[in-house]
């Protein structure tokens, strides 16, 4: 299977997800959270560092459950910046008269 390169928006979303999970983990060790989520500590480390920008849904669901996060809250948090950018109005395009008539 060929994986398409990630878009800059997907990379940024992965970084926001990692930051959110790190913050929610708090003082709990990465090992404890990973084992409770039934994933490897290496997988959790890669997600938290943003190296895995698009982790599988069951993986995120397991981590969110372990950390007491709702999936709706996770999605709202990581997609917030995208919505802000999409909601901004687009500046009108100014056309200049052609030099050639």
Image (spheres, rainbow, N blue to C red):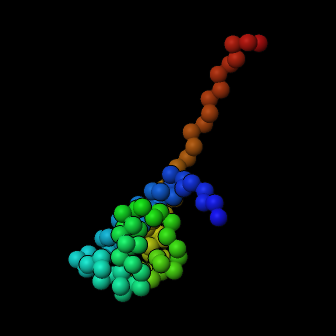
The residue lying at 51 percent from left, 58 percent from top is 10
The residue lying at 73 percent from left, 12 percent from top is 100
Determine if residue 16 is in view: no
Q: Residue furthest front?
A: 1
Q: Residue furthest left?
A: 27
Q: Residue 85 placed where, x, y %?
A: 50, 52
Give the number of callouts: 0
Q: Is residue 48 above or below residue 39?
A: above
Q: Residue 46 placed where, x, y %?
A: 39, 67
92 and 52: which one is in front? 52
54 and 13: which one is in front? 54
Which quarter of the figure has residue 44?
A: bottom left
Which quarter of the figure has residue 62?
A: bottom left
Task: Tell me the quadrant of the picture where the C terminus can be found.
Answer: top right
Is residue 26 found left or right of 101 in the rendered image? Answer: left
Q: Residue 92 placed where, x, y %?
A: 60, 36
89 and 62: which one is in front? 62
Is residue 76 found left or right of 98 in the rendered image? Answer: left
Q: Residue furthest right?
A: 101
Q: Residue 1 placed where, x, y %?
A: 65, 64
Q: Is residue 92 above or below residue 72?
A: above
Determine if residue 59 is in view: yes
The residue lying at 35 percent from left, 69 percent from top is 45
């Amino acid at each position: 299977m060929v994986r398409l390169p990630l878009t800059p928006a997907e990379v940024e979303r992965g970084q926001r997800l990692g930051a959110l999970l790190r913050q929610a983990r708090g003082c709990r060790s990465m090992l404890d959270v990973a084992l409770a989520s039934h994933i490897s500590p290496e997988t959790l480390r890669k997600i938290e560092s943003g190296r895995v920008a698009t982790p599988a849904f069951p993986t995120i669901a397991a981590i969110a459950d372990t950390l007491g996060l709702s999936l709706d809250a996770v999605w709202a948090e990581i997609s917030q910046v995208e919505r802000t950018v999409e909601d901004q109005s687009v500046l009108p395009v100014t056309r200049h008269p052609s030099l050639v008539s």
